[in-house]
Amino acid sequence: MRAVDLAIIAIFLVGMPLLGIVIGGRQKSGNDYFVGEGKISWWVACLSVVSAETSTLTVLSVPTVAYIAAPGAGGMTYLSLAIGYILGRIVVSFVLLPRYVAGNLVTAYAFLGKRFGSGLQGTASVTFLLTRTAADGIRLFATAIPVKVVLGAYGLNVSYWTIVIALGIAMVIYSFFGGVRAVVWVDAIQMLWYVLGGAAVIWVLAANLPDGWFSKAVDANKFQLLDFSSNPLTGQYAVLTAVIGGAVLSMASHGSDQLIVQRLQATNDLRAAQKALIASGVVVFLQFALFLFIGVMLWAFYNGVDPVKQLGLNTNDELFANYIVTELPSGLSGFVIAGILAAALSSSLGALASSTVTDVYERVIGRQLSDGERLKQGRIWTIVWAGILILFAGFFASYTSTSDPIVVQALGITGYTYGALLGAFLLGLLFKKARQADAIVAFVVTVVVMAFVILGVKFDKVSGALLGVDFSKAAGNNVALAFPWYTLAGVIITLVVGGLLSLRHSTQDPKATDATAAKPVEEAA
């Protein structure tokens, strides 16, 4: 009967790219290929944004967060981050989106080009290309891990390279032929697919849980939402850390990351883009709540046993995948697995191609391409970046282990650069005297300092005492700064360094007025 599951997965991998080609239609110009000529509805863009920021690690790991939460620690405190995400999106909607959509910019970094110059635009774009390649390469590899486990359970021994190549081909087909319109629509469909899969899991679990499980979970604080007890410096889900850090992180990811901005620009309407972005925050909150609730139900189903020691799994994150393979009925199992794949197949290739062509290639050749040339180069770079992502994912599959630290490192990559990216945008808005040289120096200094902070800064009992924070209950002798603070720290460094450098100038930068002025909503619409 497991052949039914494999057939569903195969149909999904073949059908989604073909559907994307049909939806995308014939691409007539580079603008159509990169931003879709403004033909995307706000609700489709909203679902696409959610799909773009959701990975296989999210779907598989979020249930584990609620499952392994210690008694009294709160199983739903992860949602505090989502509260911050909503707040951050609101700020981006009214501060940065008017500059992108109303200004008819192809990429987010074109704003930096108008405000400072092509040097910073290229610097920011290359930074995006490098970090997005690293993050998505590891994301593709991480997707191959549960797929290999699932196929192994069905008696198929498939290499990581084979899985990575198959997933990469599926992504590149609809991105190449359908452009951003295909990407956005396929993202939206795939987002609905994995959410329906999660709802199906809840339906099956509900019929197999013992009486009184809900009350037992409440008594164990599995439904606790806010964490007021953890220290704010190192507690990832402490209220202050999660809400403020999550808000700034969302401002960076949804205001300065071309992967997200491209999907919002596809609406070509400021009101629509604002609705899509703010609504995506609410959807993400509900999505996290769904998968956290699954984690609580799994805790009741397995009676809270240790996934590694008592269930024999390699890592805690295999818990949800293990349940899908071993407990769900045939057919439904394949549907849910396809949903997990859907969370991984949200394509970043269009964003990588658009940033490469508009922010880098045109600067290198010294002229602006025609629409036809942009379309041609966009497709060429879509294939190039697909090959790079596959090679990057294959490299990780061949030369790294699959232990937890690698996953943590993958999720923390953005901490090195997000603060510098968002800080550069805010520097251009807040400091009218700042020139391009000031912004580039501030950008580089921020990336270097954040690398030191992430890799080298640890808190122990002595430093905790100096800061007035008790680390005596922390695991181990040294505790790292909570990751939600990384982006805020980077923003502060960029603004301080860039702001101080701007004091050298006695007059306002002539480029500041035009670049930072946002058109009224009515005019943009």
Image: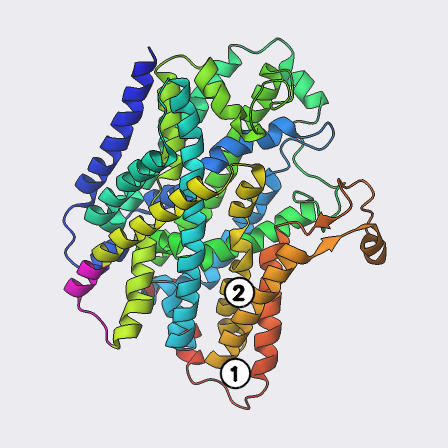
Q: Amino acid at mark 2?
A: Ala
User: Would residue 508 appear left or right of 389 to someone viewing this image?
Assistant: right
Q: Quadrant of residue 490?
A: bottom right
Q: Where is mark 2, residue-wise?
A: 420
Crowd rating for badge 2 (residues with CA inside 10 Å; few <14, some 14–19, many 20+): many
Label annotation for residue 184: none
Q: Is residue 193 above or below residue 409?
A: above
Q: Position of residue 262 (x, y in %)?
A: 34, 55
Question: 358 or 444, which lies in front?
Answer: 444
Q: Amino acid at mark 1?
A: Lys
The structure residue drawn at horizontal position 41% and vertical position 45%, both measured from the top left corner, is 395
Which of the 4 image quarters holds residue 200?
A: top left
- Residue 374 lies, in percent from the top left, at 21, 63
Magenta span includes 473:
no
Q: Residues within 10 Å of mark 1 (few under 14, many from 20)?
A: many
Tell me which residue sits at (68%, 17%) in the image.
216
Mark before the other along the chain sequence, 2 or 1 = 2
Could you say which is closer to the camera, residue 233 or residue 137? 137
Rendered view: 116 above or below 193 = below
Q: Which residue is mark 1?
A: 433
Residue closer to the observer: 149 or 26: 149
369 part of magenta stretch: yes
Q: Is residue 293 left or right of residue 52?
A: right
